[in-house]
Image (spheres, grey):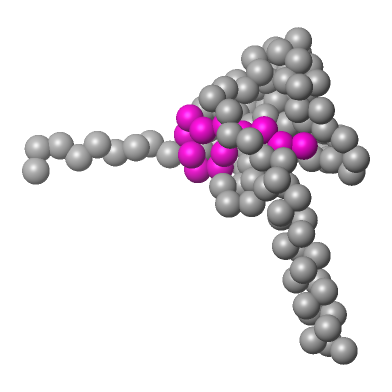
Amino acid sequence: MVSLLFHFATLFVLLCFLEAAQDFQEVSDCPKNADAWRIASDKKNCQGDTTDYLCAAIENSVGRFGEICTRYGLQSANTCAVLHSHTHNLQSVPCNVSERCPDKPYNPGELYKWPVCYEDFSGNKRQVKCCG
């Protein structure tokens, strides 16, 4: 019985990941304002259990973006909504730059208001090795 429940739970998780992956589409850029977001959302035509359109940076891939249909609630202040690099599901990661991060909880449908969330917001300084 435990084995059957384990297999059912595993199948459920995999199906959830596959559903998000089926809606995922890599794009060259995300909408920059409310009108462009609405146009992209209408074009994506999210329906059913995943009615919320999202265009976000792909985690740990600066300069790569994707759009999905999902369901979301408020994201916490000082975080950026991103797409997980493997499952393409919505997740929230810390925004570690000193300014321009979301300063209050926000709806991911308004992510365009925080352009830093489409940039390298990790706060990591890349070191350039020089001169052998």
**Which corner quadrant of the image does residue 42 belong to?**
top right
Q: Residue 106 location in percent, x, y? A: 78, 29
- Tell me: 47 left or right of 88: right
Q: Does the image show residue 66?
A: yes
Residue segment shown in magenta? 58-69
Question: Which quadrant: the N terminus?
Answer: bottom right
User: Is residue 35 or residue 15 the one in the foreground?
Assistant: 15
Q: Residue furthest right?
A: 48
Q: Residue furthest top?
A: 35
Q: Residue at x 84, y 80 (%)?
A: 5
* Residue 62 lies within the magenta run: yes
Q: Residue at x 38, y 36 (%)?
A: 125
Q: Please say if 75 is above or below 14.
A: above
Q: Residue at x 73, y 31 (%)?
A: 54
Question: Which quadrant: the C terminus?
Answer: top left
User: Is residue 109 or residue 1 the one in the foreground?
Assistant: 1
Q: Please say if 85 is above or below 101.
A: below
Q: Residue 35 location in percent, x, y? A: 76, 10
Q: Residue at x 56, y 42 (%)?
A: 59
Number of callouts: 0
